[in-house]
Image (cartoon, grey):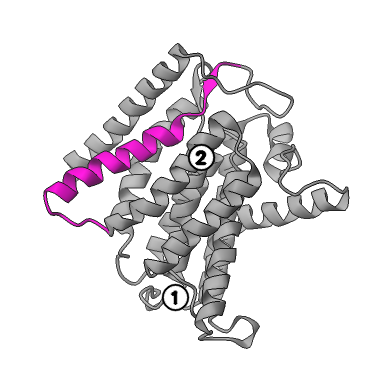
Amino acid sequence: MNFPIYFLVFALSGILTYWTQKIFIHYKKFDDINHRSSHKTLATRTGGIGIFATLLFVSTYYYFNTIELFDYSLFIPLGIMFIVGVYDDFYRADFKLKFLLQIIVAKIIIDQGYVISNYHGLFGLYEVPWILAQLSTVFVFLVIINAINFIDGTDGLAITEVIKTILLIEFFSGNQTALNPLATLLILSLLPLYYFNFKKKCKVFLGDSGSLLLGTIISIYIFYVLGSEYSFKENFQINKVLFAVLVILYPLFDLLRVFILRIKVGQSPFVADNRHIHHFLQNKFNSHFKVAFTIVILEILITSFCVFIY
């Protein structure tokens, strides 16, 4: 891919996001404003649709021109999670059904070769039996995809977190990863969403379709990092498990913290509330941009510090 293609992907994402929102506004499909909402203006949960459509259109073009940018079979798990997210955005799917479908998608990803078969010294273990590898991969997938979904409550936070995670993994990699072309398309598709996220009127949010899609891609990236193909640059050597945790530190920490708080008061850990760290920071800063910027910069500093001193 070259610069004109990059620009076209960026423009296509912006156009698709714009027209998707127009269609949903026409049919009065808005995001509800309630006690948890951080917005007081009209908004749609259609950002994920524009992102997925852009990835699909561009990949289809390359596929029919027999150019393999990445493993196009990844669209199977990505497509399933995207559809689950779209359904959830408009019909509020039961969390048990989503949980089951997430397990099925995790198994599909495992069968595509993305599996945690090596613990890299965690609990004193390295290569683990196949059944344990599969169970571990399913568990980690569930954790990551829900962690990304949970932080999608502040404008720009989820998309910035995803972009930051990808850039850190690629930066510390000794070679360009096999997922780099997909990541490039994804980042270009995400950038226009900043404009729609931070608009004062007629906002566009990721929605569950977007957060589940992004969570799936980040999960695949983490599985790749923990696999044998990923290696660090010569000057950087750090335990892979530690590195994988560091690059998604905030979503993991916030998920664990919120689960503990909800369980302590006898609530379901999956019931939405305003106890997330980004909600606290939002009340402090009164700015979505400052919240996303502060969290991501702190993560970058912590990750870089740990990698450099390891």
In front of the other: 27 or 276: 27
If you read the primary sequence from the N terminus, does the residue marked by circle 2 or circle 1 appear first? 2
Whether residue 295 appears in this view of the structure is no
Q: Is disc 2 placed on a helix, strand or loop?
A: helix
Q: Amino acid at mark 1?
A: Phe
Nearer to me, 91 or 116: 91
* Mark 2 residue type: Gly
Q: Is residue 201 magenta?
A: no
Q: Residue at 39% x, 62% y: name it.
A: 171
**Residue tagged 1:** 236
Where does label 2 land, which residue?
A: 85
Considering only vertical position in the picture, is 167 above or below 58?
below
Whether residues under marks 2 and 1 lie with C-beta atoms below 8 angstroms apart, the answer is no
Residue 255 has which mark? none
Q: 229 or 295: nearer the eye? A: 229
Q: Magenta: predominant secondary structure element? A: helix
* Dot 1: element: loop
Residue at 25%, 39% in the rendered image: 57
CA–CA distance in space, label 2 to label 1: 37 Å
* Residue 4, horizontal then vertical, whole percent: 17, 39
Mark 1: few/some/many CA within 10 Å (<14, 14-19, 20+): some
User: Within the magenta stretch, is there residue 67?
Assistant: yes
Question: What segment carries the magenta color?
Answer: 41-70
Q: In this rendering, would 53 be left or right of 265? A: left
> Left or right: where does residue 22 sit relative to residue 259?
left
Instruction: State the residue in front, 87 or 117.
Output: 87
